[in-house]
Amino acid sequence: MEKTGLIGIFNQILLDERAAWVEHQKAPTADELKEQRQLVLSHLQKIGQGNDIGLILATEKALLVNDATLYANSPAMKTSLKTALKELEAAEKSLPLVQNPTLYQAVDTAHGHPKSRTGGLPNDAVRRFCSSQAARLLNMDKSRLDADEKKIVEARKRNMRSAEKSYALLQRQALGLGQEQSQGLSR
């Protein structure tokens, strides 16, 4: 069969898939799914507004564990989620250090090389997780998700940015640098 025939067949398959998706959206369960996703989105937005780094990280952990348990359906996805969870674990262990200026001064010293700093502050485990997770979420946002799923991904990205900004302020406080907004925050 010639190439144009194959493309024509493929275009018809795509149209048929779209028609099936439209019909799927009319099913009674579609409304329930939409409601549940709206609850997830609303809760994510509420959590992000609080700027509580610990709560944002705990929420993201719940989402990552949920995805790994229920939705990981490829080796690449499983690896990505496993990496994210390991980075999150390191961030959770590192987070309390910023509360103690003496301990955090040691972290600052350990991150003395310019490549291990962002905006003049240590690019420690918390900052690395927030940045990496924002990048992973940005990649998810480019995938074939429906509008409700993309809203959830966007809320998660905003929460990661919020956590990173709040954490940068804690870093500045711990290092006695004042409250100025740090530069170089990710995504």
Image (cartoon, rainbow, N blue to C red):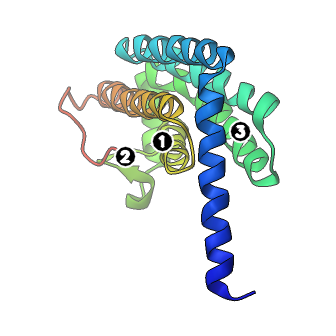
Q: Of all residues shown, which one is farthest toward the bottom? A: 2
With 180 as the anchor, is 67 left or right in this view? right
Q: Which of 32 and 143 is in front in this view?
A: 32
Could you tell me if the residues under marks 2 and 1 are in contact, i.e. CB atoms within 8 Å? yes
Could you tell me if the residues under marks 3 and 1 are in contact, i.e. CB atoms within 8 Å? no
> Can residue 53 be seen in the rendering of this structure?
yes
Residue type of the residue flagged with mark 1: Ala
Q: Find the distance from the CA under tag 2 to the CA under tag 1.
A: 8 Å
Residue type of the residue flagged with mark 3: Lys
Residue where numbered disc 3 is placed: 86
Dot 3, crowdedness within 10 Å: few (<14), some or many (≥20)?
few
Q: Find the distance from the CA under tag 3 to the CA under tag 2.
A: 20 Å
Dot 2, crowdedness within 10 Å: few (<14), some or many (≥20)?
some
First in sequence: mark 2 or mark 1? 1
Residue where numbered disc 2 is placed: 186
First in sequence: mark 3 or mark 2? 3
Residue type of the residue flagged with mark 2: Ser
- Indicate the secondary structure of the residue bearing disc 2: loop
Q: Nearer the viewer, residue 157 or 56?
A: 157
Does residue 75 sit above or below 70 in this rendering? below
